[in-house]
Image (cartoon, helix red, strand yellow):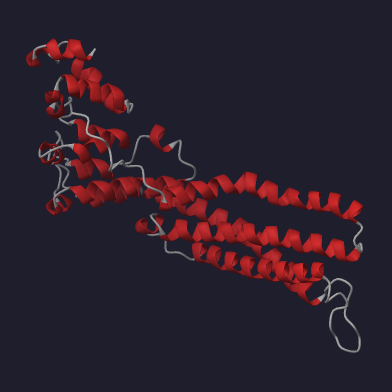
Amino acid sequence: MSEDISTIDDTKLGQSGVFDAFFRAIQYGIIEVVIEMLKANPNLLTVLNTNRRGILQSAVQHRQEKIFSLIYVLDTRKYMLISGIDEWKNNILHIAAILAPPDRLAHISGAALQMQRELQWYKEVESIVNPLSKEYTNIFNERPNQIFSNTHKQLVSDGEKWMKETATSCTVVGALIITIMFTAAFTVPGGNVQDTGFPIFLQRKSFMVFIISDAISLFASSTSVLMFLGVLTSRYAEDDFIKSLPTKLIIGLSTLFISIAAMMIAFCATLIIMLKGEMKLAIPITLLASIPVTLFILLQFPLLVEIFVSTYGPGIFDRKMKYWY
């Protein structure tokens, strides 16, 4: 294919369907095809589609981060590509401010993370354009930040609803754990010695495991509830979805997981104390106690990982892309 493109005269590329194929590859993020076509004919870098949008504008429009990352290895030509204006006088920041196509948002879990991804795109494009581009208006007299706010109102609302529902559910669980573990700390297994008030099984190692795990569970669940309350009382500004809200959710889910795990350990330690070392009964019950922790991992841990990677991971843009021309 690349050999055929290199033999076609530049004036006939449009008639031969090369332009359509080029922009179709950009739309679907087929980076290998785009690179091969550019190698065959570097002039494709400056080609515009019917809306007068070039390779970078089209990559931003369709949220194709692999195509957009080509900018990091371009020479001075990238400044010409960045400064392009489409038929509606939109610069590349205007295009980044428009809501992404539904198919590009569908693979991201939750409206809050979708909003975060949109902000990451907008901030990335904002970082490479001329500062004056932020104030540039299109034919509708709209600045990029105005377009972003207008087109993302529903996503912000959905993100707020998703975050609050998640935080509310987890707050209930955390509050229950606080109640249980606080009560357990003062009603220790085996009771207390009447004369001294010290726990009867104070010298047993299993009792120390119970006390430590009870304390960890109580402190972790308290931290979790505080984080989720922070989510519930947040002002939910657009920029909060970048790091503030995801960070609170990460801490809340992590500490909730720790509190559940510690609670199960405390429960198992109590069984061992009460059964006086009867491991035939203690081991099966301990295995059953691991089921809630396992279920929580299966249900919530993938979400926790996705939020963490999306917030603190390497990012979707490949700034270390190898030279291809």
Q: Answer yes or no: is residue 41 visible.
A: yes
Q: Is residue 312 left or right of residue 3?
A: right
99 in relation to 256, above or below: above
User: As rendered, which of 116 and 187 lies closer to the eye?
Assistant: 187
Residue sitting at 68 percent across and 66 percent down?
A: 217
Could you say which quadrant of the image residue 24 lies in? top left
Give the image location of residue 205, x and y in percent: 80, 69
Give the image location of residue 265, x and y in percent: 75, 60
115 in relation to 219, above or below: above
240 in relation to 123, above or below: below
User: As rendered, which of 309 and 50 lies closer to the eye?
Assistant: 309
Quarter of the image with the N terminus in it:
top left
Could you say which quadrant of the image residue 167 lies in? bottom right
Q: Is residue 171 left or right of residue 75?
A: right
Give the image location of residue 82, x and y in percent: 15, 40
Quarter of the image with the C terminus in it:
top left
Residue sitting at 83 percent across and 75 percent down?
A: 187
Q: Is residue 221 left or right of residue 139?
A: right
Residue sitting at 85 percent across and 79 percent down?
A: 199
Q: Answer yes or no: is residue 158 visible.
A: no
Residue sitting at 54 percent across and 47 percent down?
A: 303
